[in-house]
Image (tube, rainbow, N blue to C red):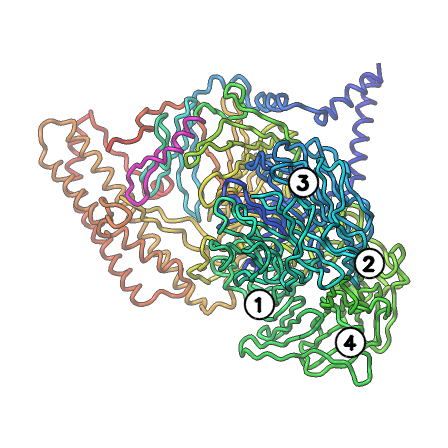
């Protein structure tokens, strides 16, 4: 017995010990805390690949550059995201031709290798049309350009892996699986800097493949396309052997190569080659399966920016109709001899597809979303349901609701509301900048003034939105001083201490105290000023590409302390972190104090803490050196020492950190693969995935008074966690209680109303935040067994309204729309709905009954102080609403009594063969009265009957109860009239009661076959 | 002896982490909700008051083992059938005319195919010829669940046969589903995922039923129906299910 007890004790202690040492895993307790998306979709975002179902024109798949995989089942009218839980950077999407309804492959990692491109993490497969996905390996592939599935053998899959962009890698080339993706063989590998940029399969003979290989490399300060290792290869034995194709094609150094086989005649093959010699760049055609080639065309449209525009598409039935991706996209109808541009749409075309069944129907993927044409791409319409916007940054203002401001890759700068009538739709967004947009800020005290910029600070604007006055306010180099070096995404920020102040970073910090009219250089060159990294003119390789995207040795982030403007932190793209504590007089480079950080790692963001001017967080991003390690550091002593707070739970590089303004241990990190949250100051992190895709988060901003965390994602637009306050209060102590309410601040009852939005059903509309009172609580485990209900009561316990309660493990949020209980309405024909009135401002109890336990929490409701209504207005409205509310219920009780007696009289008549004049008269009187009280005929549309008293009272009730101001004199007069009508009806009934009902009662007392009706009291009737 | 006892206890402590096949999981679920007692259940009548913006709308749902069903709401004291299936016809009430109307023939055909699923398709999968597959584990609302894919007979959508798949997420600790999912197959919402969450499981005459169901589109709004009363083997007039003669 002793031994058994010992054993039990031991097990118990083991379990207890585990429980005590196991840290709280925040990810288990996010509960119903859920993100919402507001897009926008009016400018959409870059799309890298389109795939059409081979026989069902309704099915369209797209792979977005940073926004995942989307599927339409109605020919492109509406799309659904089907890849949220996985890497959102997509290289290609391929439908298995032998199982096109179910089996799709996705290669992650965009192949259009611009500076801001995201990375992939392997290849995925679904066998149920996108509902479930399995990663099938190639985790180190970084970016996948093409997937080809043997139409006769779905287990045979070929993959063209472009490979790492920012460094050498061995996982690139052509891979093949013969077991449906379980294992892979590398069939063709050239070297660790040359990847497969295109791979195509002969549709009639799966043993024939063409593979294009491209030697390329990008750094933070340059791009090289081209080398002796770029080449086109062909295999005729299913990839077992490959032959380099050289006959008729340019020799020597080559850059990016694309290749396509005509579906209608596989002897005809086209290739576009980035050659060293200008006269050799362009389109080549072979009519003999690649044995011989003829140069056709070197037009600008075919040769521009090969790293970004490469794809060739060929008409399904006519091998002489070919389309080429490009700046505008172009199409040839003479076999490639001449081309014309596609119709008007967003520039920068990455993919063009023809519908096999109706080839004039085409889809085009651009930097600005997806376009559809029904006439061979002569004219195109934009698909408006794809919120793929690629934000670089976000800032917020203090309006209610607050507005968000940000710039987009190739899609200008914008601001829009976080909430709008009917939802946040395209019309809500206002354009405030051109080109590629980056950092956009409202003036801190005049939100009509907006600052924005375009790439490389080519322009910095101050825009008065109300007056529509636009001024360029960029700083210029001082006389005799070096030229200013601005990053592609140059730092621009406002000040917490001087509303007219602006900071801008080149290699220097520039400050303006007059909204950008004049500038002071506040620092020396804070970068490494490494001249070897400032040769952007040579960038591009075989095709010059000096766009400013590779500008380097620049300041990237400027963080003025929210506590004092004497303290300013600066991070540079070449790895410095600089601090001034005297408003810019002296600067110190602190990066030497950080251990474990590789030299020259890009300082992407510094968060100057609100919890102490000596506290800051610094985020470094090494991905441009092929280093995907997350680097996050915290200092509490002005940068003398730093501690690393990234843990292996963060599985990608990071770009941003946001501290909470209340709980210093609550931190948010924006990573390449989504949002992470720490509840313990960075000791552990959990990915947040409740309606938050694994999308690259470039910037995070926390609203200081409205408690919303707003994420600028590079592919899924703006994503918001509306209220992060519950996260501030999660701790291990909550695990020991069955239910714990979180603290709530007083709620504001909105007194606004509107007619909703105007968006059509093919347009994306961002969700609005809830305007309800939100009461949060914590459950240590999900409620599954037993009853759990909720209600709002007065402090005295009187029921106000029943409410739905959440039952998640962790955070749950009850929503209460400030409504009391609706009046009981008279029975009659049709819908005479009377909504509940609003509960007045005051204190209430939230009660949750869970099994036998009751938990309660006091809340307070206030009126909107910004509303134009006075308290007298509101009190009058409430009193009148109550009066009409009572009229509705009085009428309901009157009709109930009429019905009860009428029913009994009819029963009497049916059971007595001998006519009784008095009883017949009674039913006649009651029917007549009822017909004047409620509608008893007609339908709910154009066959409706004339309104009776119930309908009239309900109408005035709806008018009065839904408006927070005092009722008008007309409304009051109408109520008086209806009240008189009701009183008259009551009198009529009283007369009937005193005459025929009295006589009928006497009759029933003698007739034992029919029971006297049991008329409920008014109070019991209401409870019924 | 001491060591054997210790191992037994240790084994029981961690028994819920050992591998299970899909039949084990379904059987554990079936036993948890009453097992063979369900064989004596010929139908359910479930009553609720749905909260809709402060209004209490009485709802009655009746489901019979033979597939007949109806959902009735009461507005302004007037009961009306929202949807019913009498074994031959699915019908609804047009809210404009307040007249009964037949549902599209596809819908009726699909109701006929699902008629024998009482109490649900997973419990009776062998009898129904459905195929369950254990996909793996997934955390739902912080709760570790078995994810089971249930492939049913195809359904008819706009004249075409399409796959009919339902996913069950069964709470590993409690052996009951807390979530089911299906893909919407028609209309503007085609391709979206429809979800129903289950809680408030309670015992009634030996069987366990979820008294709270919350339905909606994944990541969207939900509507909860909290049953106040559930009656087993209710006596219902046949005419209640029937498409009214006009």
Upstream in the sequence, badge 3 or badge 1? 3
Verify CB contact (< 8 Å) between mark 3 and mark 2.
no
Judge the density around disc 2: few (<14), some (14-19), many (≥20) Cα neighbours within 10 Å: many
Residue B65 occupies which quadrant of the picture? top left
Q: Is residue A159 visible?
A: yes
Tag 3 residue = A124
**What is the x, y in percent for residue A786?**
56, 32
| Same-chain check, marks 4 and 2 | yes
Verify CB contact (< 8 Å) between mark 4 and mark 2.
no
Judge the density around disc 3: few (<14), some (14-19), many (≥20) Cα neighbours within 10 Å: many
Q: Which mark is residue A484?
A: 4
Query: What chain does badge 3 belong to?
Result: A
Q: Which mark is residue A634?
A: 2
Disc 2 secondary structure class? strand
Q: Nearer the viewer, mark 3 or mark 1?
A: 3
User: In the displayed structure, would residue A812 be above or below residue A638?
Assistant: above
The magenta stretch is B91-114
Q: How far is mark 4 from mark 3, CA to CA?
A: 45 Å
């Amino acid at each position: 017995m002793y031994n058994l007890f010992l054993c039990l004790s031991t097990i118990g202690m083991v379990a207890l010990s585990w429980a005590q040492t196991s840290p709280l895993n925040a990810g288990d307790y996010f509960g119903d805390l859920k993100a919402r998306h507001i897009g926008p979709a009016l400018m959409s975002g870059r799309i890298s690949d389109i795939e059409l179902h081979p026989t069902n024109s309704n099915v369209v798949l797209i792979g977005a550059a940073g926004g995942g995989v989307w599927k339409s089942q109605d020919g492109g009218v509406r799309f659904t995201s089907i890849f949220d839980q996985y890497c959102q950077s997509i290289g290609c999407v391929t439908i298995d031709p032998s199982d096109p309804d179910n089996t799709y492959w996705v290669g992650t990692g965009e192949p259009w290798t611009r500076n801001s491109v995201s990375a992939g993490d392997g290849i995925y497969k679904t066998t149920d049309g996108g509902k479930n996905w399995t990663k099938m390996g190639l985790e180190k592939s970084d970016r996948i350009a093409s997937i080809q599935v043997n139409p006769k053998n779905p287990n045979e899959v070929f993959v063209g892996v472009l490979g790492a962009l920012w460094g050498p890698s061995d996982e690139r080339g052509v891979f093949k699986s013969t077991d449906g993706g379980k294992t892979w063989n590398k069939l063709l590998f050239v070297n660790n800097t040359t990847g497969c940029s295109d791979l195509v399969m002969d549709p009639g003979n799966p043993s024939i493949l063409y593979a294009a290989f491209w030697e390329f490399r990008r750094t933070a300060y340059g791009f090289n396309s081209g080398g002796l290792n770029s080449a086109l290869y062909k295999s005729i034995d299913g990839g077992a052997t490959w032959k380099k194709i050289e006959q008729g094609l340019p020799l020597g150094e080559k850059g990016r190569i694309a290749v396509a086989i005509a579906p209608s005649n596989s002897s005809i093959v086209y290739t576009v080659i980035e050659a060293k010699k200008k006269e050799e760049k362009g389109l080549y055609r072979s009519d003999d399966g690649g044995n011989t080639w003829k140069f056709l065309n070197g037009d600008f449209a075919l040769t521009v920016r090969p790293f970004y525009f490469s794809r060739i598409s060929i008409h399904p039935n006519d091998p002489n109709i070919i389309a080429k991706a490009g700046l505008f996209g172009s199409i040839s109808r003479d076999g490639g001899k001449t081309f014309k541009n596609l119709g008007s749409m967003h520039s920068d075309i990455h993919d063009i597809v023809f519908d096999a069944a109706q080839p004039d129907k085409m889809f085009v993927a651009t930097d600005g979303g997806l376009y559809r044409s029904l006439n061979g791409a002569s004219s195109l319409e934009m698909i408006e349901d794809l919120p793929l916007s690629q934000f670089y940054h976000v800032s917020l203002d203090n309006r209610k609701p607050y507005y968000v401001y940000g710039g987009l890759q190739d899609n200008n700068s914008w601001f829009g509301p976080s909430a709008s009538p009917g939802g946040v739709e395209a019309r809500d967004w206002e354009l405030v900048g051109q080109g590629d947009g980056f950092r956009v800020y409202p003036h801190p005290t005049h939100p009509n003034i907006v600052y924005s910029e375009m790439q490389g600070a080519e322009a910095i604007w101050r825009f008065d939105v109300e007056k529509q006055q636009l001024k360029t306010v960029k700083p210029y180099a001082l006389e005799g001083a070096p030229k200013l070096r601005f990053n592609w995404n140059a730092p621009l920020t406002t000040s917490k201490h001087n509303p007219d102040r602006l900071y801008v970073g080149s290699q220097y910090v520039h400050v303006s105290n007059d909204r950008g009219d004049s500038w002071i250089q506040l620092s020396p060159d804070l970068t490494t000023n490494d001249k070897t990294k400032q040769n952007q003119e040579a960038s591009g390789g075989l095709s010059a590409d000096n766009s400013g995207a590779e500008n380097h040795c620049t300041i990237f982030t400027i963080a003025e302390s929210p506590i004092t403007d004497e303290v300013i932190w600066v991070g540079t793209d070449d790895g410095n972190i600089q601090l001034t504590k005297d408003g810019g007089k002296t600067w110190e480079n602190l990066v030497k104090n950080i251990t474990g950080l590789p030299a020259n790692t890009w300082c992407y963001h510094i968060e100057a803490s609100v919890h102490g001017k000596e506290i800051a967080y610094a985020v470094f991003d090494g991905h441009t050196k092929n280093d995907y390690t997350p680097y996050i550091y915290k200092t509490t002593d002005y940068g003398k020492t730093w501690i690393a707070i990234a843990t292996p739970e963060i599985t990608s590089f990071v770009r941003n950190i946001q501290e909470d303004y209340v709980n210093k241990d609550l931190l948010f990190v924006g990573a390449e693969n989504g949002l992470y949250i720490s509840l313990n100051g960075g000791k552990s992190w959990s990915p947040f995935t409740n309606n938050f895709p694994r999308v690259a988060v470039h910037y995070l901003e926390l609203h200081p008074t409205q408690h919303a965390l707003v994420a600028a994602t590079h592919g899924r637009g703006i994503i918001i966690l509306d209220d992060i306050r519950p996260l501030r209060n999660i701790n291990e102590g909550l695990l020991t209680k069955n239910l714990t309410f979180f603290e709530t601040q007083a709620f504001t009852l909105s007194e606004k109303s509107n007619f909703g939005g105007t968006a059509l059903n093919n347009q994306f509309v961002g969700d609005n935040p809830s305007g309800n009172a939100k009461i949060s609580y914590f459950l240590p485990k999900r409620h599954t067994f037993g009853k759990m209900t909720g209600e709002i009561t007065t402090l005295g316990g009187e029921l106000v309204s029943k409410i739905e309660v959440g039952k998640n493990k962790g955070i749950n949020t009850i929503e209460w729309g400030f409504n009391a209980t609706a009046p009981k309405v008279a029975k009659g024909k049709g819908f005479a709905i009377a909504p509940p009135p609003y509960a007045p401002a005051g204190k209430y109890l939230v009660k949750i009954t869970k099994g036998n336990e009751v938990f309660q929490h006091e809340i307070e409701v206030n009126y909107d102080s910004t509303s134009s209504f006075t308290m007298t207005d509101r009190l009058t409205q409430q009193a009148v609403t109550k009066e009409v509310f009572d009229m509705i219920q009085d009428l309901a009780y009157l009709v109930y009594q009429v019905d009860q007696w009428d029913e009994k009289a009819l029963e009497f008549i049916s059971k007595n063969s001998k006519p009784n004049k008095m009883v017949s008269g009674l039913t006649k009187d009651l029917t007549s009265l009822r017909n004047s009280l409620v509608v008893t005929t007609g339908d709910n549309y154009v066959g409706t009957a004339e309104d009776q008293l119930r309908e009239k009272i309900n109408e005035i009730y709806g008018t009065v109860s839904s408006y927070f101001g005092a009722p008008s004199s007309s409304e009051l007069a109408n109520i008086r009239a209806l009240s008189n009508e009701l009183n008259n009806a009551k009198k009529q009934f009283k007369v009937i009661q005193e005459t025929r009902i009295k006589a009928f009662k006497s009759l029933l007392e003698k007739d034992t076959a029919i029971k006297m009706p049991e008329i409920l009291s008014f109070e019991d009737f209401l409870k019924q | 002896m001491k060591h054997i006892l210790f191992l037994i206890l240790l084994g029981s402590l961690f028994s819920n982490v050992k591998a299970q096949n899909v039949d084990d999981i379904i059987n554990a679920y079936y036993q948890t909700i009453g097992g063979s007692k369900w064989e004596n259940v010929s139908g359910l009548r479930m009553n609720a008051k749905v909260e809709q913006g402060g209004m209490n709308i009485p709802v009655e749902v009746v489901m019979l083992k033979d597939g007949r069903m109806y959902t009735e709401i009461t507005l302004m004291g007037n009961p009306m059938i929202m949807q019913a299936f009498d074994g031959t016809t699915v019908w609804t009430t047009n809210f404009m005319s307040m007249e009964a109307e037949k549902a599209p023939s596809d819908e009726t055909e699909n109701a006929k195919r699902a008629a024998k699923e009482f109490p649900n398709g997973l419990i009776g999968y062998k009898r129904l010829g459905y195929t369950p597959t254990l996909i793996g584990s997934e955390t739902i609302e912080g709760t570790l669940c078995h994810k089971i894919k249930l492939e049913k007979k195809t359904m008819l959508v706009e004249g075409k046969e399409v796959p009919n798949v339902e996913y069950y997420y069964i709470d590993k600790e409690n052996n009951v589903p807390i979530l089911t999912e299906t893909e919407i197959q028609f209309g503007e919402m085609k391709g979206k995922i429809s979800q129903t969450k289950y809680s408030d499981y309670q015992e009634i005459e030996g069987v366990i039923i979820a008294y709270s169901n919350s339905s909606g589109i994944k990541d969207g709004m939900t509507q909860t129906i909290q049953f106040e009363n559930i009656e087993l083997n209710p006596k219902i007039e046949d005419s209640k299910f029937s498409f009214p003669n006009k």
